[in-house]
Image (cartoon, rainbow, N blue to C red):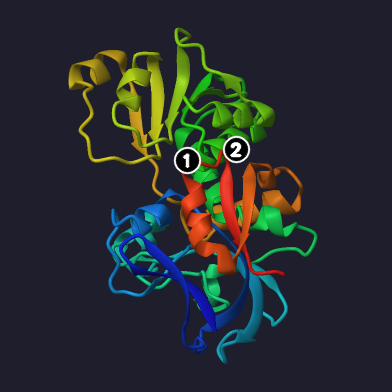
Amino acid sequence: MKAAALTAPERVDVIDVPEPACGPRDVVVRMLGVGLCGTDTAVVRGRRKTPQLPWVLGHEGVGEIVAVGESIRDRQVGQRVAVEPNYCCLSCDPCQAGFTSGCRKRNAVGLTTPGLLAERVAVPAAFAHPIADHVSLADLVCVEPLTVARAAVRRSGAREQQHCLVLGAGSQGLLLCQSLLEIGITPAVQEPHAGRRELAMSLGATVGDTHQEVDHVFETSGAPGALDAALERLRPGGHATVVGMNSAPLAVSSHAIVSQQWSITGSLIYDHPVDFADTIAALEKGALEPHRVLQARFHLDEAAEAFTAVAATPGKCWISFEG
């Protein structure tokens, strides 16, 4: 069986790996497509360390069930599924409170457990979400990052007609724009890359006015200093939601936060199972078109080229397992 793996620092190869074993509470999924994102490229470039080499990459995966564990009754061979690639324990205090994104034992696919860029993978059945046949593969491959974006909007409390600024129009920023448009907000985007900025505008966003005050700021770029500058445009009582990450400290003072009564929220992934299920329901209703963010498709044999293309491609790159 073939898989795309990190075999040495910054080297991606297609290698042979063993067939997955289907545990009693697992399903085996024949992969159809895997999206690529900044987390994946951080692994390739060595910014996120892997437990071993070679290391199978990828975490934004969709496919078709080809085997079902003996204890599973609510999944069937032939179902198309989206993989929720953060396996929470469901037993720690945060999980028991429904805050599974804060799980203390979370297993992250592609980071702490091997990834999804393989022809077949074993997945805990509870994290393989069935999805209706009428949803296109191009939309389906965007489920995981779209869920990240929609969870950030949910946590922000943003409401229809409010003024929202999205910092960064990479794939996460673009999907966040779609998520805001879904609830009746036309987002303004701040993005220095012309191609990404134009793609955001084609989705319905506007170019951010550098002087207009806003009710909400969504930081998706992870660029040092981006949030500091944007807070200067946040209205008193405004809300900043941070999705992008970097290690640089914020320059904002507690005096500014208190005197302006700002709320600053970090939004990490999503909560199981509600956020994933809600995104799938929205796709099945036709409420969103995340495929419009996809800009470059590669085959598994072209995995190395796909990872190279991520940085230069406006929008999202993905790997298709179909011919």
Q: Which mark is residue 152?
A: 1
In screen coordinates, is 226 left or right of 250? right
Q: Give 321 or 205, whichever is nearer the viewer.
A: 321
| Residue at left offset 29%, top offset 40% | 246
Q: Position of residue 194 (x, y in %)?
A: 55, 26
Q: Residue furthest bottom?
A: 70
Query: Measured along the vertical axis of the image, is residue 81 above or below residue 125?
Result: above
Q: Residue furthest right?
A: 134
Q: CA distance from mark 1 to mark 2?
A: 9 Å
Q: Quadrant of the C terminus?
A: bottom right
| Residue at left offset 50%, top offset 86% | 20
Q: Which mark is residue 205?
A: none
Res 8 visible: yes
Q: Under tag 1, what secondary structure?
A: helix
Query: Measured along the vertical axis of the image, is residue 250 above or below residue 17?
Result: above
Estimate how packed mark 1 is, as few (under 14), some (14 to 19) or many (20 or more) residues with alpha carbons within 10 Å. many
| Residue at left offset 50%, top offset 41% | 312
State which quadrant residue 167 falls in. Answer: top left
Q: Position of residue 68 (x, y in %)?
A: 61, 86
Q: Amino acid at mark 2?
A: Ser
State which quadrant residue 206 falls in. Answer: top right
Q: Which mark is residue 179?
A: 2
Do callouts 1 and 2 mark residues in contact (Cβ within 8 Å)?
yes
Q: Amino acid at mark 1?
A: Ala
Q: Position of residue 60 (x, y in %)?
A: 53, 60
In screen coordinates, is 142 left or right of 134? left
Q: Give 102 or 41, whichever is nearer the viewer.
A: 41
Q: Give 77 or 111, whichever is nearer the viewer.
A: 111
| Residue at left offset 55%, top offset 76% | 125
Q: Position of residue 187 (x, y in %)?
A: 57, 24
